[in-house]
Amino acid sequence: MQLTNPPQVRRKLALATASLLGAVGPVAQAATADDWQVDSSVLYYSEDSRVTAIEPVIRARKEIGDDEYMTYRLVVDSLTGSSANGAIATASPQTFTSPSGNATYTTPANTTPLDPTFLDTRVALNAEWEKPLSRYLKGIFAVNASTEYDYTSLGVSATLSRDFNQRNTTLSAGLSYNLDTIEPVGGIPDGLTAMPTTTSVQKSTLGSSDDKTVADFLIGVTQVIDRKTLMQFNYTYGMDDGYLTDPYKILSVVTGPSSETLAGTPYLYENRPDSRARNALYWKTVHQFNEDVINFSYRYYWDDWGITSHTLDARYRFEMGGGHYLMPHARYYLQDKADFYNYKLVDGNIPQYASADYRLADLSTTTLGLKYGIQLANDSEFSVRAEMMTQQSEGDAPFPDVDAMILQLNYSFLF
């Protein structure tokens, strides 16, 4: 099943900005025109009593001309477990129908309702062509496709980078466009209509599938500050149009503002606006000391759904000698809720748009981790990363904390 706001392991294929400041690793430095540079990884992600994901990734890059490269990337991720359906916990057990409408599941009293039918596998492919267009101008052109049980995405992107000031300043501009098709199990539910509580009643649907488009524009500058410091500034504007509602999320309807007693029609399917304008400002600095490197970034985001967020991210690479290194990582994310986020709805006072998806709520996320890496023979490198993530409610509509563990193994080599 597709989640409109999926876990950390599933991210949008967007304009490549990190590459503007990406430090070249030992494998890339040693690569020749006859070599394939291969980066492979396996990521394991687990939320307590909820979603578990395994994601293998392989990326291959080859020089096909003078400073001209082709890069291919394959991602396969598998998600299983239980996902919060949006309903509130109550003093009595609750019974819900599955998305197909052919089965039911029951949540015990005083327990956050979780849909246990969450199961999905996604395959994503990306191809990127990097080519010098003149002495100081470079283009990066990409296509991507991904498919899963109920969701298909096709996209293209292009980025132009122009060097100035003896190559100490780089201006970049990029566009990306994706066309997505959603085919949820059981059809597209009619927003804010009743979710059946028995299999004998059919839900109201708007058809079997719907589409949305996602377009992004990026403009940025990368500046060499001195021999050991690099800084980057980006602005991104994005527009989503079409079906943006999560077809698997519902809201509880209660009898009064301070009540936890369910109304006669206890559950409604959520409904979100069919457009979303997004903005983001991004700043990143990389500084090298004698050997160690610090990497710090800040991102401010806002959209016309009312969501604003701040993201702070810091990494420090300690060189330990003999090809060994350690990289501590700390990330903090703070978000204000969407205008239409509702922990629950009051019977007789149903708005035009509403969602109880906690990923649209007031929340904060803290991630702490450590990466260990070692350079091996034959220009290869192995690394392992372990992190802990905690997501907490920051508003007056609380949801239980979500704790997650992340483990990733990486191996890079020349072929």
Image: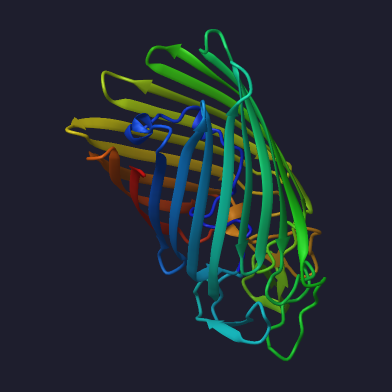
Q: Is residue 353 left or right of residue 137?
A: right
Q: Residue at x 58, y 41 (%)?
A: 128
Residue found at the far top of this picture: 165
Number of disc labels: 0
Picture colour scheme:
rainbow
Depth check: give the residue in front, 294 or 176: 176
Q: Residue at x 49, y 20 (%)?
A: 231
Q: Is residue 300 left or right of residue 323?
A: right
Residue found at the far bottom of this picture: 200
Residue 256, placed above or below residue 381: below
Q: Is residue 132 left or right of residue 188?
A: left
Quarter of the image containing the C terminus? top left
Residue 325 placement (x, y as % from top left): 24, 36
Residue 197 placement (x, y as % from top left): 68, 84
Q: Residue at x 61, y 42 (%)?
A: 14
Residue 237, placed above or below residue 244: above
Res 114 seen here: no
Residue 23, placed above or below residue 126: above
Quarter of the image containing the N terminus? bottom right
Depth check: give the residue in front, 184 or 391: 184
Q: Residue at x 78, y 63 (%)?
A: 210
Residue 337 placement (x, y as % from top left): 63, 48
Residue 88, placed above or below residue 334: below
Residue 52 placement (x, y as % from top left): 44, 65
Q: Quadrant of residue 292?
A: top left
Depth check: give the residue in front, 123 or 259: 123
